[in-house]
Amino acid sequence: MLPPQKLTAAEQQIFSLGRILQSLREENTIESLIATTVRYLQEDFEYKLIWIAMYDRLNHILLGQGGITPSNDKNYLKQHLVLNPGDLLEQVVTEQRPLGVADLRAELRAQAWQQLAQKYEIQGTIVLPIRYKNHFLGVILLGSQRWGYLLGGEARARLMMILGELGAAWYQLEIDSQNQQSKHPEEKLLKLLENIRNLQKLELKLNAVVEATQEFVLPSRTNIYWLDTEGRYFWRRASNKSASGVFHHGNQQIAGITIQELSDFYYALSVNELVFIGDGRSSFQSNCTVKLLQRLKVRSLLAAPILRNKDLLGFLTVESSEPRIWGEAEQNFVRGAAGLISLVTPLDEVETTVRQIQDDAYLSSQIAQGIYTNKDVQEILDDCAARVLQRLGASRFLLLHFDSEQNQYQIFYQNQLPNRRGLNLAFETPKDIDWQLLAAAEVAVGIENLEDDLRFFQWRPNFIDNGVRSLLISNSNPGNSPLGLLVVTSDTPRHWISREKELVQVVSQQLGVIVRQWQLQRQTEQQQKILHSTHQCLRVLGQSQNTYSQSIEKLQYSALQQIGEILHSPAINLLYWSPGDAIAQIYPGIITDSQFAINPEAIIPISEPLIHWAVTNAGLLSFKLSELPAETRKWLHGSAIGQVLVMGLHTADDYETTGVILITDHRERQWSEESLYAVENLIFQLAWLRRNLQINTKLHSKSAELQQLNWYKHRRLEDIQKSISQILGQMHDLGIPTTELTQMRYQQLLRQLDNTNASMTTLLKLEQWQLHRSWETVTIASLLKRSLERVDNLLKIQRLWVGVHGLGQEDGENNSNQNYSLLPISGEKPQTLSIAGDMVKIELILHELIMTACQRAHTGSRIDIWCRRLDADSLELSITDNGTIEPQLLVELNPELSSKDVLAPSTLEKPPGLHMAIARTLMQQLGGDLQFYQLPDSRLVSRLILPLAGE
């Protein structure tokens, strides 16, 4: 058999590594783990300083567990190092990765080791974390007398394997230790339950709980505190030691804690929260932690609430005079013991509770019976308020309803003790979180002390100023928006139990029926009022429309007055203007509060943003004052203005808006949909009737002017006709001149005067107040010739040449002095082409068209007249020129493109537009037509359609 071969150095290292790993797995204490690790590192690595420390995560310190130093100094090895930001060790703990320094003697971040390093020449040092998965367990510090800290690949691998196995074994030992030390509260609680079941008196049961808790948790002392709801303090009812500090409970002096001094602690218990204050830890962050420890003269405590039907009866507390971390088993036992106490309350309290429940049920039934038997509402409320105040020992009974228009709660009914005065105030809408709390609450919301509770913070000043310190608030329709509220108040801070909250909730729901009936009745009355106001407004507006003597100011005032009665707003104004204006005028309207008025002397342009928004949108628009631009807020100077409603006086899309209704009110003001709908209808009616009144007034004025003009011209024509008649009479009286030539001329002039006098007589007789249509025929050539002769002087002044196309020279004549020429119509004889109708009026229309064309034509240019037979019954006569015309006039002369708004500024109100519009209308009445348009080459065309004479 061969002798065993000697192991190489590498094999020796692997063998040694395997042995140490096996040893680490077999160790059963942390101390042996550390000793084994140190021994291996000392043997296989040349480190003069080895230090292993455990990390205390609660206090953020390193606890030395062992190692080696050149002098084997135990003080360094067992030291506790507090980790400070910036330290070398703190960086390793925080980052959980290795960190090295080349010379420990000069490392300022490791001051705790500098003295030792300088003494023993420790230079290259490396600090490595000890961890298992995500659990950080401690650190190991390795220092050598060589400069530098780098490790070779093989040595680094062995070191990492050792640390990994050390972390796994260390973690498992901690888990095993915790499992061995853990307590089992369920066994002790079962034993405690068996003990107290055989006891009769409550005090004996409480003492048994105290003793069992003290034995299990082993604190400095164990106490049970009981809540006095009237005095709002906890008094010590059971303890394993004598009390310190006293309160009076009945005729006895007892130790206690007031709710006022430790409100956070009280509210935590009220919501069934376990309160623990240990070594550096607390279940709630508050200055109450310090107060509570000082008040009980302890350094740590654990308190569990004692509840019954969600009402806080008291709490069980274990207290320690030293800092202590409360384990999970201890917390579970204390909470379970407190739960056992809530189950063993005496039967006499149960009997009292039953009697109170019976009394509350009787109270509820009496209210319901009163409501459904049509009993007087005031009597029902008075009786209910008196019973509730007596039952709860409260001072005030308030029934509130939500006013949606004012956006606040109003007092619907109130009752109070005889020595209290009634409240005369309104309550703002609570914050969203309080609104949601009321909507979701199934029972009344209790506020024990207004000065400490932040709920309903907006109402606190009103209540505190009137002596209220505690209250119950209940939504009359739980699960829905709180439109009705019942508020019961107390003048002193007090604790409200569940039975009291449930009673107020039931009463609130029953009284909510009354409030809802009243709200429905109020809504009906308001709708009737709106209907009446609308009827009154329409009646007034209708009268204003039919009576010219009533001014537009009365119309506007009546409408604004009715709008004010519907909306109840403090200021309603009208901004108005005429078409074409740039500045709006202010009609003051209805102003009941000067704080909402606008500046009456302000200059407000039509382009102002608020007016622009109202004009370009239909219906009422609402704006907060903060949403308006700065230039608008300058003339909206009322100090109380917070909200603005505007609406333009809209009629039809084709008609211009000539006014804006402006309503100012509080920022929080809201209106019902019925009110806004009624106001929109009134404003719409106002816009139409105001427009109709303006149109009627304008037409009445025009009619009066035309009547005056017609009367004046007719009387003048009568005078002229009389004068001509007298002259003719005198000429006839003088006789016939003697010479033949004179006689001929005399006879010719006399015939002309006779004809003129005859036509004027016919005009005065037949057309005094209306046009008379005659019937005659004339050739188109003669008509054009006479019309051109009438403007011959104007043609010479303007140096214009007129060309008539489509006709030949009548009778072959051509006057060389004329500025026009007649060209033949193809295939027609001029003598046979005639038109029929009232030739006097047709000739006047044709003369007006030719004269207008001459006036706008450029000097030295030409005018063309085109004649063309359209069909057997009509002739087209087109007059073209190269003059200029106002574009708006050309648009308005076209009926399809012109505006239908008679109140809008128009070019047809004055010549030449007025004359051309009259000619067009008259021509249509005579059976023809007249059109105006512009050709692509910019020439202007007046197209006249004339009726032809039948064969």
Image (cartoon, helix red, strand yellow):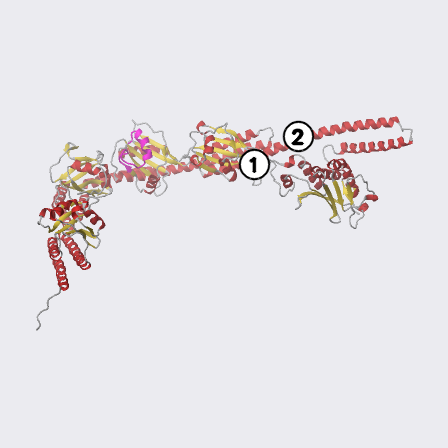
The percent coordinates of residue 525 (x first, y second) are 45, 35
Whichever of labels 2 and 1 marks the residue nearer the N terminus, that label is 1
Q: How many labels does the image show?
A: 2
Asked which secondary structure carries label 2, the reply is helix
Name the foreground residue: 561 vs 717.
Answer: 717
Task: Give the secondary structure at mark 1.
Answer: helix
| Label 1 Cα neighbours within 10 Å, binned few <14 / some 14-19 / many ≥20 | some
Q: In this view, does 731 lie to the left or right of 148?
A: right
Q: In this view, does 938 lie to the left or right of 410?
A: right
For the point 62% across and 39% down, the residue is 888
| Residue assigned mark 1 | 688
Residue 154 spot, x, y in % from top left? 18, 60
Residue 81 vs residue 673, the one in the foreground: 81
Whole-percent x, y for residue 37 in the image? 13, 55
The three-letter amino acid code for the residue at tag 1 is Trp
Q: For marks 2 and 1, give the CA distance.
A: 24 Å
Q: Quadrant where the N terminus lies?
A: bottom left
- The residue singled out by tag 2 in the image is 704
Residue farthest to the bottom? 1
Which residue shows up at 11% across the image and 48% down it?
A: 120
Quadrant in the picture for residue 388 = top left
Left or right? Give the position of 813 relative to 354: right
**Amino acid bearing label 2:** Ala
Tell me where the magenta segment starts and ends, as one range.
Answer: 446-468
